[in-house]
Amino acid sequence: MSGYREVAAGLREAINEGEYRPGATLPKQDELAERYGVNIKTIRQAVGLLEAEGLVTAIRRRGTVVRERPPLRRLGTERYSKKKWKYGDTVAFIADREASGRAWERTDQTQSVELVAADPEVAEAFGLEPGLPVYERARIVRDAGQPTHTLTSYYRREHVEGTPLVDATPGPAGPGGGFAVLTLQGYEPDHMSETIFARMPTPEESEMLELPAGEPVMVLTRRTYTADDLLVEFARGVHAASRFSWTYNFTLPE
């Protein structure tokens, strides 16, 4: 008799070889139990293991469904190309959509803007005392109605006061987005650093991103500087891990 790990391995192989394609529903548990010669408890354990791996998810009234492969490419340095936002009107998340062959709507990005007290991480980034006011621009980004990630940017008050970056209208902050706005203010983005790590989501993030059980998130922090090394934006993004593939192209350093 097979154990649940062996059953999970068999199902995993069937999924990877295309027997059960993305979006397909696995056979009922009693059918799987008969196929593998095990009891229902073993099948439940095997399916639970595949859920934890992110291969399948349970959908009410439908059953256990094979999850879709990452539908969107998240570009690396190319998404920030100046020819896109400085000389065109394509902001970073739209560049990802274009690279993935997907259309976008202004309502794909919600918006909330408020003056908030800088938390320790934001304060450290800007060299401020914690609690001093900074502008927070928070977005939820969707693809075909499904949330893909959140992105929250922070700015010094004196850099963006009275600009489109403090306007809560859904969508980018005008042609070229926030980087174009900063450039018009005299703070042209020149270089940045990004840090990425994975963790399990908080309950609030799971609800906001409509995550199935067991799916982790990819957390990105971004620091954007002028040529004079002045920090003009600190951003945090929380991405549904299964909804992106991350692509980076770069020249090898000497």
Image (tube, helix red, strand yellow):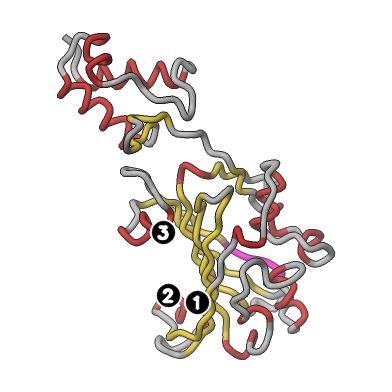
Viewer-nearest residue: 166 or 92: 166
Of marks 2 and 3, which one's residue comes earlier in the chain?
2
Instruction: Give the class, few, some or many, for how many residues have Cα within 10 Å of label 3's Cα (few <14, many ≥20).
Output: some
Residue at the location (62% across, 78% down)?
232
User: Residue 143, how many percent across, how many down?
Assistant: 58, 50
- Looking at the rendered image, the disc whose residue lies closer to the viewer, 3 or 1, is 3
Label 2 and label 3: CA atoms lie apart by: 22 Å
Check disc 2 and report the residue beneath it.
Answer: 121
Label 2 and label 1: CA atoms lie apart by: 6 Å
Residue at the location (68% across, 44% down)?
102
Check disc 3 and report the residue beneath it.
Answer: 208
User: Residue 130, how many percent across, how many down?
Assistant: 40, 86
Q: Which image quadrant is residue 129 in? A: bottom left
**Residue extent of the magenta highlight:** 189-193
Instruction: Give the class, few, some or many, for how many residues have Cα within 10 Å of label 2's Cα (few <14, many ≥20).
Output: few
Mark drawn on residue 125: 1
Q: Quadrant of the N terminus?
A: top left
Question: From where the camera sits, is residue 68 visible?
Answer: yes
